[in-house]
């Protein structure tokens, strides 16, 4: 079946001026050739540290950031072929939920007007049908009708994120881009919102692109995972493959920091501590971008950039010269 969303070689490069007086021109390759696919009813986790390009990828899919290369194909149609005028209608099919429920809701608007706003802007329905739709959405996200008359400051963090989700659902989208939707919440609220998102997905059959730095939440939420480092996908595959048989050293390091009941089960008894911080995307290391931090790096790694390649025909791929179907996990 045709995927609902596809990115092919997606690039977002920003020109910047560097140097003390801004005399040097350089390019930040925030997203550097990203291929993703996502089907209806499926959740793909896009996982990386801050500055990895994960949020810019989501924004480029939404056309909030203009791609400088590659393309986004939604429901078989290249998004860049859609005219600005038509795009407003087209965009109804994919919506975004932001990380911070505190700043993404207008404090001067009631919850009811916040949720109705996308319908008002898109000119959908009359007043009575919008009122009915808002009540339906409040109930879908587990809020009372009476919450509709409140202002965001009178709601808890979890309730505000429910409002953000209801607003994103107002126009019946097929795809939700969830940009760190639970990272501003405490752990018990995180679980409630994750469960809510899963219930909504089951009921409406939506596709989710779940952007996160937190693999514990990704494990609860996703069907497939793509790990991004300095603008490039370094490993992608079904959730179980990524968690049980991580093949890229970066994925292994990220996973080694995730608390699990029995770490020996996955052959990783110790935490892998990476050297240094990620490099700047304006000046990425040569060859494999990860090589200055990699505990497995060899000479070839600083010279040749590894391509993302299929490991074992199970939709599991990694971009590492030494990744294979049964990568031996390091005992740090
Ligand atoms: Fe590490 Fe080399 Fe693999 Fe890059 S290619 S992840 S540096 S071993």
Image (cartoon, rainbow, N blue to C red):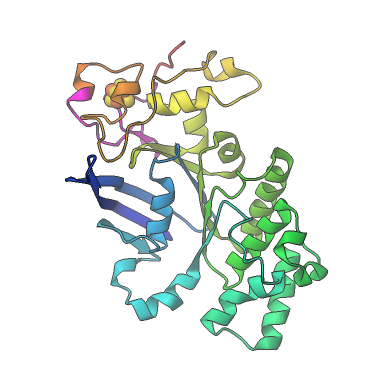
Direction from residue 55 to residue 173 in the image, left or right = right
- The reply to whether residue 95 is visible in this rendering is yes
Residue 48, given in percent of the width and then of the height, sits at 44, 38
The image quadrant that residue 61 belongs to is bottom left
Q: Main secondary structure of the magenta part?
A: loop
Q: Residue at x 40, y 66 (%)?
A: 75
Residue 214, given in percent of the width and then of the height, sits at 55, 37
- The question of residue 28 being in magenta is answered with no
Front-most of residues 79 and 302: 302
Compared with 234, 26 (above or below) is below
Front-most of residues 262 and 302: 302
- The reply to whether residue 245 is visible in this rendering is no
The quadrant of the image that shows the N terminus is bottom left
The image quadrant that residue 206 belongs to is bottom right
Residue 245, given in percent of the width and then of the height, sits at 46, 26
Q: Residue at x 60, y 39 (%)?
A: 217
Residue 137, given in percent of the width and then of the height, sits at 70, 69
The image quadrant that residue 309 belongs to is top left
Direction from residue 188 to residue 75 in the image, left or right = left
Compared with 318, 327 (above or below) is above
Which residue ends up furthest to the top in the rendered image? 331
- The question of residue 324 being in magenta is answered with yes
Q: Residue at x 43, y 17 (%)?
A: 329
Q: Residue at x 25, y 36 (%)?
A: 283
- Segment tinted magenta in the rendering: 302-326
Compared with 140, 197 (above or below) is above
Which residue ends up furthest to the front in the rendered image? 21
Total tally of numbered discs in the picture: 0
* Ligand 1 located in image quadrant: top left
Front-most of residues 212 and 226: 212
């Amino acid at each position: 079946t045709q995927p609902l969303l596809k990115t092919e070689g997606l690039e977002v490069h920003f020109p910047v001026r560097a140097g003390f007086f801004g005399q040097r021109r350089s390019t930040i390759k925030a997203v550097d050739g990203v291929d993703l696919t996502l089907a209806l009813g499926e959740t793909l986790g896009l996982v990386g540290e801050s500055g990895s390009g994960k949020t810019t990828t989501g924004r480029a899919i939404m056309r909030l950031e203009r791609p400088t290369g590659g393309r986004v194909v939604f429901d078989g149609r290249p998004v860049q072929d859609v005219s600005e005028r038509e795009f407003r209608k087209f965009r109804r099919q994919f919506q975004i939920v932001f990380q911070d429920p505190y700043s993404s809701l207008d404090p001067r608007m009631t919850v009811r007007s916040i949720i109705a706003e996308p319908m008002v802007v898109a000119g959908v329905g009359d007043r009575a049908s919008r009122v009915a739709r808002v009540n339906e959405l409040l109930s879908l996200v587990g809020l009372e009708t009476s919450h509709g008359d409140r202002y965001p400051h009178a709601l808890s963090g979890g309730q505000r994120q429910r409002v953000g989700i209801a607003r994103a659902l107002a126009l019946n989208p097929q795809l939700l881009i969830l940009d760190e939707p639970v990272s501003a919440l405490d752990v018990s609220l995180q679980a409630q919102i994750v469960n809510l998102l899963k219930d909504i997905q089951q009921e409406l059959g939506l596709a989710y692109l779940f952007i996160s730095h937190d693999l514990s939440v990704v494990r609860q939420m996703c069907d497939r995972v793509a790990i991004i480092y300095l603008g490039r996908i370094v490993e992608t595959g079904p959730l179980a493959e990524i968690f049980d048989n991580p093949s890229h050293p970066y994925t292994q390091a990220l996973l080694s920091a995730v608390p699990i009941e029995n770490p020996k089960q996955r052959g990783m008894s110790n935490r892998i501590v990476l050297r240094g911080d990620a490099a700047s995307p304006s000046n990425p290391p040569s060859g494999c971008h990860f090589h200055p931090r990699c505990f497995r790096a060899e000479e070839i790694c600083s010279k040749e950039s590894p391509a993302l390649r299929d490991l074992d025909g199970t939709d599991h791929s990694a971009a590492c010269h030494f990744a294979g179907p049964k990568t031996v996990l390091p005992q740090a």
